[in-house]
Amino acid sequence: KKKEKKKKEKKKEEKKKEKKKKEKKKKEKKKKEKKKKEKKKKEKKKKEKKKKEKKKKEKKKKEKKKKEKKKKEKKKKEKKKKEKKKKEKKKKKKKKKKKKKKKKEKKKKEKKKKKEKKKKEKKKKKKKKKKKKKKKKKKKKKKKKKKKKKKKKKKKKKKKKKKNCLFV
């Protein structure tokens, strides 16, 4: 009986030990699980953070791009405006120059016309004067011619006389 009792006790002890061992194992497992979970959680958090950071960076990049685009657009617009202004100025200048040229040409033409007119008038006057002079000269010439004729006649007479004289 004593032996039996001892055996039973031993068995009981063994069972207890086993139980303890099992408990320990369970606890360990739980601990491990917990650790694993914690790790996972941490990893998740890290990932999330990274994701958020990435998003933030992307947003910033996008914003920068947008800003740059806007700036470029503005610059382009400004350039266009400036170019337009320049062109307009050039056009105006050209127009002014053309106008001035036209005016000058007109003036020149007018001057030429005036000069021509004056020249013509002068010529006309000269012609008139010449005509008058000619008329006067003609009259004078006529008178002179008559005188000459008379002289010639006289000469002829003289010659005749000479001939007669010779004849005698």
Image (tube, rainbow, N blue to C red):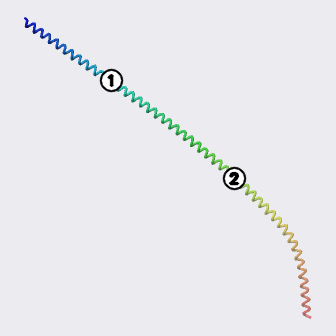
Q: Position of residue 38 (x, y in %)?
A: 30, 21
Mark 2 and mark 1 residues within 8 Å of each other at the beta carbon: no
Q: Where 152 sits versus 120, above or below?
A: below
Q: Position of residue 52 (x, y in %)?
A: 39, 27
Residue at 50%, 36% (x, y): give it.
71
Taking depth in this image into account, of 126 and 161 the one nearest to the observer is 126
Q: Position of residue 96 (x, y in %)?
A: 65, 48
74 left or right, relative to 93: left
Residue at 61%, 44% (x, y): give it.
89
Q: Where 98 sits versus 29, above or below?
A: below
* Image quarter in which the C terminus is found: bottom right
User: Which residue carries the number 1 mark?
Assistant: 42
Residue at 8%, 6% (x, y): give it.
2
Find residue 164 and report its image quarter.
bottom right
136 left or right, relative to 88: right
Q: Position of residue 123 (x, y in %)?
A: 79, 63
Taking depth in this image into account, of 140 and 42 the one nearest to the observer is 42
Residue at 35%, 26% (x, y): give it.
46
Q: Amino acid at mark 2?
A: Lys
Q: Where 126 sits versus 11, above or below?
A: below
Taking depth in this image into account, of 69 and 33 the one nearest to the observer is 33
Q: Residues within 10 Å of mark 1 (few under 14, many from 20)?
A: few
Find residue 83 and report its image quarter.
top right
Distance from Cα at disc 2 to Cα at disc 1: 91 Å
Mark linked to residue 13: none
Decide which of tag 2 and tag 1 comes sooner along the chain.
Answer: 1
